[in-house]
Image (cartoon, rainbow, N blue to C red):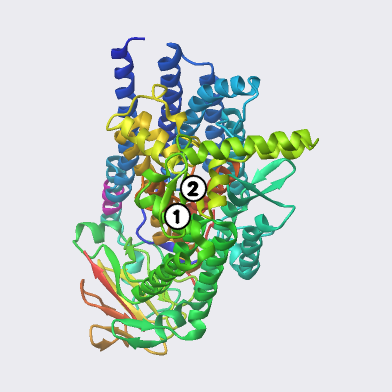
């Protein structure tokens, strides 16, 4: 068994930090309750009723999570749980605040019989998903046992995944492809990344992310030596063998496929970045990073040349120059943008034509078809008729306006108008935060993410097993990259691609996957930080050690 | 509510946000440099150990190191020895697969090799499963080769019998190089 070697651990001060963890957790709860209180005070001048429902619910769940962590992973990193709770809590306060504003508008619009957006801020739903997420965290911590006891009956550790590397890889690919399968997949807001299961829509990509990390870690643990040592040297680059290069090309093609089929640039970027970073962690060769970045650049270049991938071109165009697209723009094949917003003649004509068509259909007795015709956006219709690609930058620009409105100190929670941005509760929640908390508040949010990532990387450094090292490193990197892609997107640093903001965005799949991610990190950090078993008696060939 | 009160509430909330982040960083800081309480506890323990040593000289010191390769002294030698005497306090991997790894020297022996139960696991084709061992004796760290195939080198000399390791002198095991540092 693990006797001699486990006696000393690498550098980590392995004292329990449960008191610090609890103190920070209480602080995170205070933060959440304060956010709810500020919303109420600003809106009605009193403490809101939601404080007890939503804030109280989160507090109870967080305390249960803490108790379980104390019981099953007492040496866990003290920061991971409080930081996740804080982000989740602030996100919920923002969604609650948006819900208060939009639900009234929603009801009014419904009564007036107007077209309503399918999804809106939904605070009760978010609370339920938070419950589910934290419950998954609790279950994951409780069933994942110490990695030092892999032989125990029914033991399931992060290392168990190493035995099923290729199964997990296959599972991840199936999960990714599910949304394309007709009947199972569903298209929401133009992205085909959803599946509907018994009335719920789930984003399998969020879970596939974690499975891919497990797959890459398992694959690279076996191949890293061949990858880092064998190969031709051309200048500063060491080019690996074709058989080692094969998998990265396959993954690259696969990501292109995802991008192509699901029109989901962000996810493709996320997976590719994940693979390149894990290659780098495994091989410590900069040449792999260069090959990866080169392939990515090549992919983007190829995609912009393909005529049927016009929308990628358009994304880049909107990123560089969003103004002509405000409220609707049409990218023609000669590269010019024709505005088709409600003030233009094209739009008005299209509206009249569409209405006439609908009335004709109604007269012919086709009520259902008429309804559908009325739902078609005139801008989109006119643009398609002209042979261009329609897009709307209003969301991005309104997000930017919100950030500008917030400026340095923000308007204060409950005092801005963040709901004016479409999807202000999910993709654009970071801009909503920017409006109400200002740059000062956004900095703290980014720092919280940075701290989670740093603790994850620290866990990776401290882990002794190469597989767990890669796993922890990959999991933390994927979180960092996801935050970068979405925050960079909504702040116009990079072209906008739809990804969820971990813990802040409204959405069940994202919350569940991220809570599992935190559970995995907590378990691994416990294993890395716990003290080595001590010898019970002093000497002799055979040692008796206590593994507890 | 007046605008002034709302502004105050807003600023207070931002302050709470920042305090939270600062508190979190404070916890990390304590992890890196040790909290005050932990440092005190450690020094107290060290004093106690030093006193115990004065009263009763450890058995381990009296035994010749060549005695038994595996069953050699396991009882923790005096903690005070490496703290008070200014001996090396950590083992650093300076070259090889696990470069950057640091192991605190607490007095318990350190085993190095490819075996999973080694203190420092080197995944290296040139290392044996149980390659070498480092242990403390009379406030000095001793390196001992455990019959490895490719040998252990202290500086440029091959380790054939247990040899004391001065701080800063590289120990080479396969492609891995380690050093003791103060």
- Is residue A531 visible to the viewer in this orientation of the structure? no
Residue A64 in the figure: left or right of residue A37 = right
State the residue in front, A202 or A444: A202
- CB within 8 Å, label 2 to label 1: yes
B1 relative to A313, above or below:
above
> Quarter of the image containing the N terminus of chain A?
bottom right
What subunit carries mark 1? A
| Residue at numbered disc 1 | A314
A386 relative to B69, above or below:
above
What subunit carries mark 2? A
Q: CA distance from mark 2 to mark 1?
A: 8 Å
Report helix, strand or loop for mark 2.
Answer: strand
- Is residue B33 visible to the viewer in this orientation of the structure? yes
Report helix, strand or loop for mark 1.
Answer: helix
Q: Position of residue A437 (x, y in %)?
A: 35, 30
Asked where in the image residue A287 lies, by quadrant, the reply is bottom left
Residue A444 in the figure: left or right of residue A425 = left
State the residue in front, B115 or A97: A97
Q: Position of residue B105 (x, y in %)?
A: 31, 63
Q: Residues within 10 Å of mark 2 (few under 14, many from 20)?
A: many
State the residue in front, A194 or B109: A194
State the residue in front, A325 or A484: A325
- Which residues, given as a range, are shown in magenta? B43-51
Q: Position of residue A262 (x, y in %)?
A: 58, 57
Write the residue at 29% across / 24% down.
B11
| Residue at numbered disc 2 | A391
Q: Say yes or no: labels 2 and 1 on the same chain.
A: yes
Write the residue at 64% across / 67% down.
A170
């Amino acid at each position: 068994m693990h006797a001699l070697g486990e006696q000393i651990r690498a550098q980590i001060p392995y004292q329990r930090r449960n008191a610090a963890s609890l103190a920070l957790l209480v602080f995170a709860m205070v933060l959440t309750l304060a956010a709810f209180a500020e919303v109420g005070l600003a809106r009605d001048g009193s403490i809101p009723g939601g404080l007890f429902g939503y804030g109280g619910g989160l507090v109870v769940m967080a305390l249960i999570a803490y108790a379980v962590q104390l019981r099953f992973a007492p040496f866990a990193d003290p920061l991971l749980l409080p930081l996740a709770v804080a982000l989740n809590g602030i996100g919920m306060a923002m969604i609650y605040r948006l819900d208060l504003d939009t639900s009234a508008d929603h009801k009014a619009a419904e009564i007036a019989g107007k077209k309503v957006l399918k999804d809106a801020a939904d605070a009760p739903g978010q609370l339920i998903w938070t419950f589910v997420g934290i419950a998954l965290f609790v279950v994951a911590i409780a069933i994942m046992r110490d990695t030092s006891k892999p032989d125990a009956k029914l033991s399931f550790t992060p290392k168990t995944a190493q035995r099923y590397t290729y199964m997990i890889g296959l599972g991840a690919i199936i999960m990714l492809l599910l949304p394309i399968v007709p009947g199972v997949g569903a298209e929401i807001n133009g992205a085909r990344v959803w599946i509907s299961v018994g009335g719920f829509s789930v984003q399998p990509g969020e879970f596939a992310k974690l499975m891919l990390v497990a797959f890459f870690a398992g694959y690279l643990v076996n191949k890293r030596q061949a990858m880092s040592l064998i190969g031709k040297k051309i200048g500063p680059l060491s080019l690996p063998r074709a058989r080692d290069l094969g998998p990265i090309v396959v993954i690259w093609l696969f990501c292109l496929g995802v991008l192509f089929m699901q029109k989901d640039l962000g996810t493709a970027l996320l997976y590719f970045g994940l693979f390149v970073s894990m290659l780098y962690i495994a091989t410590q060769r900069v040449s792999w990073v260069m090959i990866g970045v080169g392939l990515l650049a090549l992919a983007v270049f190829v995609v912009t040349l393909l005529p049927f991938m016009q929308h990628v071109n358009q994304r880049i165009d909107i990123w560089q120059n969003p103004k002509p697209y405000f409220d609707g723009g049409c990218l023609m094949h000669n590269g010019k943008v024709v505005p088709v917003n409600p003030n233009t003649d094209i739009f008005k004509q299209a509206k009249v034509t569409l209405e006439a068509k609908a009335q004709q259909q109604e007269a012919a007795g086709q009520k259902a078809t008429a309804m559908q015709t009325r739902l078609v956006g005139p801008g989109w219709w006119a643009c398609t008729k002209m042979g261009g690609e329609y897009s709307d930058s209003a969301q991005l620009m309104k997000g930017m306006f919100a950030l500008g409105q917030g400026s340095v100190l923000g308007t204060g929670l409950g005092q801005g108008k963040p709901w004016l941005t479409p999807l202000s509760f999910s993709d654009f929640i970071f801009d909503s935060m920017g409006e109400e908390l200002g740059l000062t508040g956004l900095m703290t949010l980014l720092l919280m993410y940075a701290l989670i990532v740093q603790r994850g990387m620290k866990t990776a450094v401290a882990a002794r097993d190469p597989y767990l090292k890669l796993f922890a490193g990959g999991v933390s990197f994927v979180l960092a990259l996801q935050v970068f892609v979405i925050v960079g997107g909504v702040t116009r640093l990079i072209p906008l691609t739809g990804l969820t903001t971990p813990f802040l965005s409204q959405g069940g799949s994202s919350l569940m996957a991220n809570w599992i991610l935190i559970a995995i990190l907590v378990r691994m950090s416990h294993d890395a930080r716990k003290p080595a078993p001590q010898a019970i008696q002093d000497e002799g060939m055979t040692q008796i050690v206590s593994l507890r | 509510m007046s605008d002034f009160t709302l502004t105050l509430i807003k600023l207070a909330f931002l302050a709470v946000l920042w305090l939270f982040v600062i508190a979190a960083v404070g916890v990390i800081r304590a992890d890196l440099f040790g909290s005050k309480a932990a440092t005190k506890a450690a020094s107290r323990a060290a004093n106690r150990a030093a006193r115990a040593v004065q009263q009763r000289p450890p058995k381990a010191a009296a035994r010749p190191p060549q005695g038994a390769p595996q069953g050699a002294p396991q009882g923790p030698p005096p903690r005070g020895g490496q703290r008070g005497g200014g001996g090396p306090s950590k083992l650093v991997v300076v070259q090889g697969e696990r470069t950057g790894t640091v192991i605190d020297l607490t007095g318990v022996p350190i085993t190095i090799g490819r075996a999973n139960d080694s203190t420092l696991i080197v995944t290296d084709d040139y290392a044996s499963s149980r390659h070498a061992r480092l242990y403390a004796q009379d406030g000095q760290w001793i390196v001992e080769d455990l019959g490895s195939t490719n040998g252990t080198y202290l500086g440029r000399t091959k380790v054939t019998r247990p040899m004391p390791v001065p701080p800063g002198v590289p120990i080479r095991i396969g492609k891995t190089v380690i050093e003791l540092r103060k």
